[in-house]
Image (tube, grey):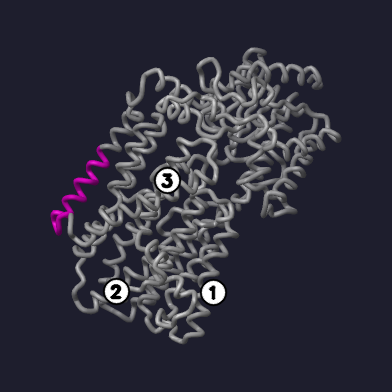
Amino acid sequence: MIGYRSDIDGLRAVSIIVVLMFHAGFGDWAGGFVGVDVFFVISGYLITSLIASELQTGTFSLATFYERRIRRLLAATIPVVLFTTLFAWMFFTTERFTAYAQSVIAFATYTSNWFFYSQGGYFAAGSETAPLLHTWSLAVEEQFYLVFPVAMIALFRRPVLVRPVLAAVALASLAYSQWLLTTGQLDLAFYSTLSRIWELMLGALLALSPGLIVRGRIAATTMRVVGLALILVPVFTYSAQTPFPGFAALPPVLGTLLLLAADPQRADPLLRLLESAPATWIGRISYSLYLWHWPVIGAMETVVFDHNDLHKILALLLSFALAALSYRYIEQPIRTRERLPKGRDMAGLLAATTAASVAFGSYGWLSGGWPGRMPPEVEQVAAAGSVRASYADSCPNISDKPPGFCKVGGKTGPADLVLWGDSHAASLEPALRKYADERGLTLGLAVRLDCPPLAGIWRSKDPTKLCRTFNDAALDFIAREKPRLVVVVGRWSVYTNGPQLLRDDERTAGNREESQAVFASAVERTLQAINGPTTVFVEQVPENFGDIPSAYLVLSRLGLTFDSVSSPVDKHRKRMQAMNATLDQAASRHAFVRFDPADVFCSRGPRCVADADGRLLYSDDDHLNLDGSLFLYPALAAALDAAFAKSPAP
């Protein structure tokens, strides 16, 4: 068995620091999610070393192995879940509490990775406020270790097969991971245990290959330098737009293997840094730190709406303090058997804890978010604000899946106007439907979530170009229907400013500037492609500092006024600069109508409004709810009437 190596604690410190900086939102660390891959390799290396050593001496016991795992899990997770539950009880809307309750069930049953996959992905909007999101990686590990020890027992009966079989599984897992990415299944690739086990397997293979440890001083030093570079370069060059893991995970994984394979007896400045007291201390508390940091950061983002770097630093410092206390007074005593029962009693405690968590989560889920946690008047307003403006009732065949189109309204025949866009278009559907109903018009709907309504583009995290396929189909739909108006709606700033970058046949959009150039070209192509109908280009509704229903609840709980969440007018205008510049240029060459929702939302003072007449106008930070859509309706209807007056009659 591998003895204690202080440099591995130092390596843990590196991995947890990059994860913390990424999760805290420091932009230069946008690839910090690779720190989890470093943890996977270390885990596979150390756990396999332990299993192999005990199998060779005949002392390995599945019961003992799983007891150790339970001690490690229970030691630090219980106080974290208690904290997140108390916070959710106080500050979550019924909708968010329902999702949280479901995540507690997933966490207790070690299926968090599959639960969060079903919720829309690691980088999805709103994921930062899911307190247990980070437990997906713990679920991957535990699913792996549920099977791996049993497989090792079977393989050790024919020792010659151990490494070839593990290598074959690792290669198959890596190939599967890359295949998922190339077929556009990015979220499944990120969360699936099958697409991740190659990282643990490579650590296991190194543990089973002691001959690979490099003992020469120059070679060991070189390996450490190269290994650390392979980890850190992706930290500062990868982003949410990087298809991951697949081949993109090879640099941090191989870098970790190089650091583990470099002889720790051959000292050099880098080794001394990894073995330094601060580094090893951070490494020792890294598990507790990983557990605590995300709930703390999420809590900060829930109660501090316009947060800045100071708030991020304070959240990290609080995470360190909680992790240190947890390690000293909870994790260590329990793991060293000073506390908690042993053997069957330990299994009983795990069963009881799991049952309690599942019972709590089930009630929170099935009750619809445990209503009654807040004053009735607050709950009523927050719940009404969470009602999204949904096109599903009007057009059930439209979804975020392969494109579907439909027509609604008071008469048969071609559509008089077509709504084309992403989820922001979906949020305006009630206003467009009301407009069509009042005027006896037929409304065509062409909506796909996360797809900007622009010709010839796709998103950087859309390798199968589904958005391009959808937009081509939308233009065909418009050509067939020959409407008088085409209303184009999108969340434009997320494509011009990030994080979702645009691509076309000429540019890969590796940065914001390229994405803005793609956007400008796409606007030109789109206005040309909509040949005949008048185009109504709806500019973006103002974004807010936080989820509006949640913010209302938080501020009500804290006794604060609801005027610090909506966007300042000048900030909104600045965010729209790139889009406005593009539309100004396009207006010099094309005739189209522009409608700016900010003229309605940002005309009452220095801040745009997020509520009116006792009603919330947003379902989250950027999507209008039903009330918000209807709040915008009078101005939008007037703009559409003017556009119809200018458009050619059929």
- The residue furthest right is 589
CB within 8 Å, label 1 to label 2:
no
Q: From this view, report whether residue 136 is shown above or below residue 609.
A: below
Q: Report how far apart the C-alphas of labels 3 and 2 lie in the structure.
A: 33 Å
Residue shown at 53% from the left, 79% from the top: 222
Residue neighbourhood size for the residue with mark 2, other residues' Cα within 10 Å, grouped as few (<14), some (14–19), many (≥20): some
Residue 414 showing in the rendered view: no
Say which of marks 1 and 2 sits in front: 1
Give x and y (percent) for residue 105.
Answer: 31, 43
**The residue tagged with tag 3: helix, strand or loop?**
helix
Taking the view exactly as shown, the residue that stands out farthest to the bottom is 216
Sequence order check: which comes first, mark 3 or mark 1? 3
Q: Residue 234, labelled with which disc?
A: none
Which residue, given by chain and number where applicable, does mark 3 sit on? 116
The secondary structure making up most of the magenta span is helix
Q: Which mark is residue 155?
A: 2
Is there CB contact under 8 Å for labels 3 and 1? Answer: no
Query: Where, quadrant-wise, is the C terminus in this rendering?
Result: top right
Image location (x, y in percent) of residue 428 = 60, 26
Please state which of the two labelled residues, at mark 3 or mark 1, is closer to the viewer.
1
User: Where does the image place residue 380, in percent across and percent down from the top left?
Assistant: 41, 20
Q: SS for tag 2?
A: helix
Q: CA distance from mark 3 to mark 1?
A: 34 Å
Q: What amino acid type should be assigned to the residue bearing mark 2?
A: Leu
Q: Which residue is mark 1?
A: 226
Q: Which residues are magenta?
A: 340-359
Mark 3 or mark 2, which is nearer to you? Answer: 3
Quarter containing the N terminus = bottom left
Q: Nearer the viewer, residue 569 or 446?
A: 569
Q: Where is 90 relative to 31, above or below?
A: above
